[in-house]
């Protein structure tokens, strides 16, 4: 799948954002190694801290389905109700969630401020010297393991 198409799917996902507090709507589209796409939006909460970012929504949907191998995530964000016009980079917590499941040297994060204006970054660039499963003596998470089909 092209980066342009993945960004389109992130823009579509952004329409689902639940953002009554920040009014900042984010969308993500996560591409698995075998070509499936999981979309996510941010979901806020009156108590603030339970809020979930778009990137983690996409990851958690995919993990639930048994996906364990990921290629790229596209992320778009900006004030609710307006077209995107600026870059929106993943927060530190989301970068750490990516680090759990993704190879820092190959997993790509595609930021976009329009479908035509895109930047592709490696996870290693966004989270240098990160801490991952292998630092606790664990292997990288296993490939698809028979989660819900
Ligand atoms: N947010 C995301 O969903 N992803 C990002 O990459 C940055 C921030 C959300 C969290 C919160 O709902 C809102 O944007 C404002 O911080």
Image (tube, rainbow, N blue to C red):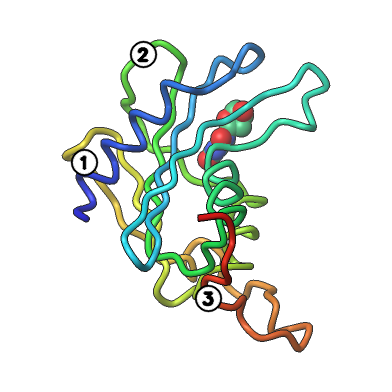
For marks 2 and 3, give the one nearer the viewer: 3
Residue 35's quadrant in the figure?
bottom left
Q: Give the label on residue 143, or none.
A: 3
Q: Is residue 128 left or right of residue 88?
A: right
Nearest to N terminus: mark 1 or mark 2: 2
Observer-nearest residue: 52 or 90?
52
Residue 133's quadrant in the figure?
bottom right
Residue at (68, 75) in percent of width and height: 132
Residue denoted by label 1? 117
Q: Is residue 37 left or right of residue 63?
A: left
Find numbered disc 2 in the image and state the secondary structure of the residue it sits on. loop
For marks 3 and 1, give the one nearer the viewer: 3
Nearest to N terminus: mark 2 or mark 3: 2
Mark 1 crowd level (few <14, some 14–19, many ≥20, 10 Å Cα): few
Q: Position of residue 85 (x, y in %)?
A: 31, 26
Answer above or below: position of 110 versus 66.
above
Residue denoted by label 2? 82
User: Regarding ligand 1, which quadrant of the image does it lie in?
Assistant: top right
Observer-nearest residue: 51 or 117?
51
Q: Position of residue 80 (x, y in %)?
A: 46, 15
Residue at (36, 37) in percent of width and height: 10
Residue 135's quadrant in the figure?
bottom right
Answer above or below: position of 22 versus 103.
above
């Amino acid at each position: 799948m092209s980066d342009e198409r993945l960004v389109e799917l992130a823009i579509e996902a952004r329409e689902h954002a639940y953002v009554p507090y920040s009014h900042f709507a984010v969308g993500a589209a996560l591409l698995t190694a075998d070509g499936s796409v999981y979309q996510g939006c941010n979901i806020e909460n009156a108590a603030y801290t339970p809020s979930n970012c778009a990137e983690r929504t996409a990851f958690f949907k995919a993990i639930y389905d048994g996906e364990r191998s990921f290629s790229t995530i596209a992320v778009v964000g900006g004030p609710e109700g307006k077209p995107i016009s600026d870059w929106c980079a993943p927060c530190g917590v989301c970068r750490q969630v990516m680090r759990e499941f993704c190879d820092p040297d190959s997993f790509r994060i595609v930021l976009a401020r329009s479908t035509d204006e895109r930047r592709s970054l490696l996870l290693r660039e966004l989270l240098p010297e990160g801490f991952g499963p292998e630092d606790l003596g664990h292997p990288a998470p296993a490939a698809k393991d028979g989660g819900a089909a």
